[in-house]
Amino acid sequence: MDNEELLGKELSNLYAISKQVNTFFNGSNISFLNERRKTMLEDYLKLSCKYENEIAETLRNIKVNPGNTTDSIVDEITENLQEVISQKGYKKDSKQLSYMMSLNRLISYHVANIENIGFLLNEVELKNVS
């Protein structure tokens, strides 16, 4: 596998992450979050939707079909988020904190994938310049 193929795989993974995030949060119950946290989540989702659309276009341009790619780590984190949402025994503050900790894991994972793509792009550009 060369760097361009690796980049296609990473872009497919980023597409999968964005798509799974957007699907999970579409209609998700976040009524228990305070307004500041809701706003932060909404900002993250706007960015995630933007990435999904831009990456889909990029993948088409480089002739990579992500197919039904899913990310197991995103699956696990969204399952945790769903558990928190459905729990009835949490105090409101504890529920918000637990939800935000899982959301932080998800966002951090998403950001790490974006950083990996940036690293790969630099490597591909440096190789093409040499």
Image (cartoon, grey):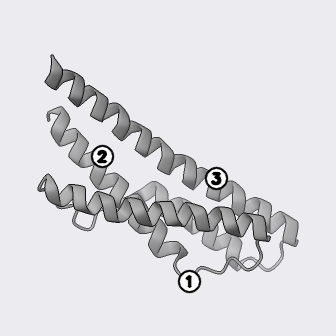
Residue under the image location 21 percent in, 47 percent down? 8
**Inter-mark Cα distance, 2 to 1:** 28 Å
Along the viewing direction, whichever of 80 and 32 lies nearer the viewer: 32
Q: Answer whether residue 43 is visible to the viewer in this image.
A: yes
The crowd level at tag 3 (other Cα within 10 Å; few <14, some 14-19, many 20+) is: few
- First in sequence: mark 3 or mark 1? 1
The circle drawn on residue 104 is 3
Q: Position of residue 125 (x, y in %)?
A: 22, 28
Secondary element at tag 1? loop
Q: Quadrant of the N terminus?
A: top left
Residue under the image location 36 percent in, 63 percent down? 52
Secondary element at tag 3? helix
Residue under the image location 64 percent in, 52 percent down? 104
4 is higher (above) or lower (below) than 34: above
The crowd level at tag 1 (other Cα within 10 Å; few <14, some 14-19, many 20+) is: few
Instruction: Check disc 2 and report the residue beneath it.
Output: 10
Instruction: Check disc 1 and report the residue beneath it.
Output: 27
